[in-house]
Each structure stands twice: as C-alpha cells, then as structure tokens.
Image (cartoon, rainbow, N blue to C red):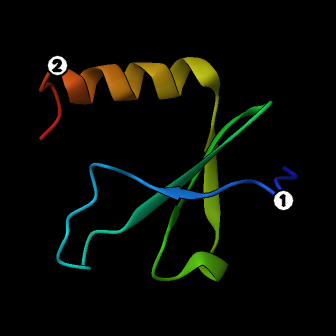
Amino acid sequence: MDHEGAQWFKSSYSGGSGTECVEAAFTTVGTFVRDSKRPSSGDFHVGPGAWSHFVGALREGELH
C-alpha cells in the first residue's frame, strides 16, 4: 500500500527510554505503524475502524 510522503509521528504510548519506539502515520486509507528505530524494516497498515478500536482499548486500560 502506498504511503509515500506520510507524516510519521512517535506514539505518545512509546516509552521514554528509547527501547519502545512506535511511529504511526495517518493516511486516507488508514494508519501505518512502524518501529522508529528501524523505519526501513517495514510497517503494517490497519484500517480506520481497527485503529479506533485499538486506541479506545488503550485508553480504557484493556491492553497492558
């Protein structure tokens, strides 16, 4: 899936120690996620509904 030019940002849920670095980029087709320490290693895509459910579960403390 094409995401060239996407604006990547570091997740506020990433740890501050430099060992847990997740980046995301919102696009018209959904959200892309990658490891910020190895951005060329690849990424994965989730649809808008799945991303919303994931973030909601984080906020509600359903994921640890």
Left or right: 58, with 36 as reference point: left
The residue under the point 61% across, 53% down is 44
Where residue 43 appears, as percent x and y from the top left, is: 62, 62
Q: Which element type, helix, strand or loop, lies under badge 1?
A: loop
Please tell me the numbered disc located at residue 60: 2
Give the quarter of the figure containing the C terminus: top left
The residue under the point 56% across, 17% down is 49
The residue under the point 48% across, 73% down is 36
* CA neighbours of label 2 inside 10 A, class few (<14), some (14 to 19), many (20+): few
Figure check: 61 above or below 21: above
Q: Which element type, helix, strand or loop, lies under badge 2?
A: loop
The residue under the point 50% across, 28% down is 51
Answer with the quarter of the image where residue 58 lies.
top left
Q: Amino acid at mark 1?
A: Gly
Where residue 9 appears, as percent x and y from the top left, is: 53, 56
Please tell me the numbered disc located at residue 25: none
